[in-house]
Amino acid sequence: MSNKTSVADSGQRQQTNGHTNGSAQFAKLGSGELVPSRYVVRIGEIDVMVISDGVLSPPAESMATNADPAVRGAWLDNMFLPRDVFDWALNEVVVRSGQQTILIDSGLGMEYPDFPKAGRLGMRLEAAGIDLGSVTDVALTHMHFDHVGGLLVDGVKARLRPDLRIHVAAAEVKFWADPDFSRTAMPPDLVELARSASTRFLKEYRGQLRTFEEDVQVAPGVVVSRTGGHTPGHSVVRMTSGGDRLMFAGDAIFPVSFEHPEWHNGFEHDPEEATRVRIRLMRELAATGGQLVGTHLPFPSVGHVALNGDLFRWVPAVWDY
């Protein structure tokens, strides 16, 4: 069994959602943050740290744009969730394999006031003792603003190694040179945010990009593979060592995907292909027994996928201490 360790940060902003109202007295006793924000899993000889960048709160309808509103509302009710806004976790991963330290995605960054509960990655990397200068590689699942924004924060590039390698699918780079949002349900402000973030990212980091067509091994046991669907170059990262497996699925799998894999996410540029991709990946996970981590699954999002008839069941891992 893989070893797992959870760690709560200190000195961060206190959560103020319905579960922690009235907890200010506890905050005065020590840490300013009452939620854990990093969690380590050992995959054979590979260390995998899931780090929370916070929470995004888009409209609830964006998680199931093709669903009957009554059915979507009933699902939310059954999950004890509000019908108007759906809180999405925003998880990134740091992988240590051999002599390499790989950052998978970089979170939202600090320039988007419409998402005040996200953009925590920099301070949480620091709290975890991870120096940006130690990162040898970045693997991008795709180039939406909540995946590249952390690399656009003022001062970050100067702290990165000059020989940093950024691995991204060639199809993703090509797409964002002239992106098409016609199949998404993104509101105009988020369309412009996505367009500007990708443009800035390509301008800042084009010289450090290492593109691949279908897959690439970026470190021992760490392979990035293009899936398409969510975006044309969307990719997942598979980690394999000593018989253990873990997949970071990026935005291929969402909290609703297990019971309703057919529901389209509003940020998907090819919703039908995204549906086929997530079903294929969940079948793979159910067959192999490998662990899953996803960008928008509830932190720390470590768990397994089991078959449930023609659908799937999410089985969260038991936290070890």
Image: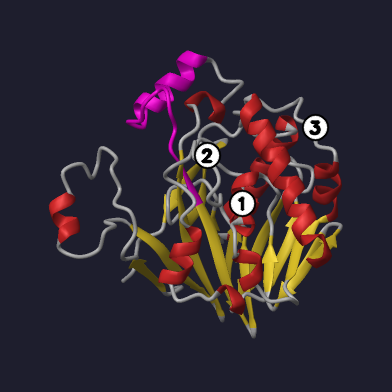
Residue located at (69% from left, 71% from top): 137
Q: Which residue is mark 2?
A: 258
Foreground pick, 169 / 126: 126
Picture disc at residue 149: 1
> Where residue 205 sits in the image (x, y, percent)?
76, 61
Three-letter amino acid code of the residue under disc 1: Gly
Q: CA distance from mark 1 to mark 2?
A: 28 Å
Q: Which residue is mark 3?
A: 180
Residue 186 visible within the image: no
> Where residue 28 sits in the image (x, y, percent)?
16, 59
- Kind of element beneath mark 1: helix
User: Are the residues tagged 1 and 2 within 8 Å (C-beta)?
Assistant: no
Q: CA distance from mark 2 to mark 3?
A: 28 Å
Three-letter amino acid code of the residue under disc 2: Phe
| Residue 82 in magenta stretch | yes
Residue located at (65% from left, 49% from top): 281
Three-letter amino acid code of the residue under disc 3: Asp
Residue located at (43% from left, 37% from top): 87
Nearest to N terminus: mark 1 or mark 2: 1
Nearest to N terminus: mark 1 or mark 3: 1
